[in-house]
Amino acid sequence: MTDSDSFSERHGLHGGDAEIVTREDAPEEVRAAVLMLGYAAGMGPGALRDIICEVLLKRPDPNNWSPGNIENEVHRLVDEAPWYQIYDIAERIHAKLMRDNSSGTKQADYARRLTQVFREHGIGWQMKEGRIIFRGSEAFSLATRDAVAIMREAGTPTAANEIREALRDISRRPAADVTGAIQHAMASLECVAREIDGSSDTLGQIIKRLTVPPPLDGALHRLWGFASEQGRHIQEGREPSFKEAELVVTVASAVSVYLLRHSARR
C-alpha cells in the first residue's frame, strides 16, 4: 500500500501547522523523516549511504557490507551531521528519486511528506522543486507565492529576477543573507515602480506619484528609507535582523503585485 492509499491521505487528515520555531537546526524529527521517507520511496541502505557520504565527504566504512550494518552506519552519520547538511542530504535524495523515477510520483511524494513534517514541527523550511527553501509566515507565503509569475506576465522580468534573488538570499544555509534579501526585494519593487511611472527616478521619488492611498504611501516611504539605510548603507554593528528582512521581502512583494494589478485594471 502506498502512502496515498493510507487512511489519513484518503480522508485529508494531518497535523496542523505549528508556529515556526526552528530554522538553524535539524531536530531529531527532521533527521528521521529525511531517512524514513527515503526508505519509503524504495531506496536501500546502500544507496542512502552513498548519498550521505557524498554530501559529508566521508568514506563509507569498508567493514560494513551487510544491509543491517550499513543501515546502522547511515543512522550514525545522519545523527552526527551538521544541521544544514541534513537539508543538503534531503535535496540529494530528491534528485536521486527524480533520476530513477520517470513518472515523478516518488519525488513528489517525498517533497510533500517532508514539507508536511516541517509544518507539523515548526521548521522554517519547505521543499519546492527539489530544493529546501525558506518558509515564512502565512503573510510571507501569500505575498511571495505568485509574485514572480505575476511580474513575468506583466512584462517586468528584471523585477521577477530580483525577487527570486531575494528569496534565494533569505533561504541561504547555514546563515541567510539578510542584507542581500532586503536589497533585492526593494530593487524588485523599484523596477515595478519605474515601469508603471515610466521614469528612471528612484523609488523614493516615485512613491508620491503611485496609486498607493494615504497613509500607506507614507508607510511605503518609511520602508524605502529603512531599506536604504539597512540594505544599502549598512552601519557597523547594525546588521538587519532576519525578521526585518522577512518583513521587507513580504511588503515589497505584496506592494509590487498590488501595483501591477492596479495598473492592469487601468
Image: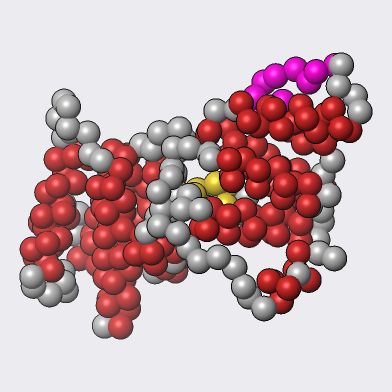
Vertical position of residue 240 compared to residue 110: above or below = above
What residue do we see at 17% from left, 27% from top?
237
Of residues 148 and 109, the one drawn nearer to the viewer in this rendering: 109
Q: Main secondary structure of the magenta part?
A: loop
| Quadrant hosting residue 252 | bottom left
Which of the image's four quarters has the N terminus? bottom right
Would residue 256 appear left or right of 20 to someone viewing this image? left
The image shows residue 134 at horizontal and vertical percentages of 45, 49
- Segment colored magenta: 53-62
What residue do we see at 79% from left, 52% from top?
41
Which of the image's four quarters has the C terminus? bottom left
The image shows residue 220 at horizontal and vertical percentages of 15, 60
What residue do we see at 91% from left, 28% from top?
66
Q: Magenta stretch: residue 211 in it?
A: no
Judge whether residue 67 can be spotted in this image: yes
Of residues 207 and 83, the one drawn nearer to the viewer in this rendering: 83
Judge whether residue 156 can be spotted in this image: no
What residue do we see at 53% from left, 40% from top?
27
Would residue 66 appear left or right of 241 to someone viewing this image? right
The image shows residue 197 at horizontal and vertical percentages of 20, 65
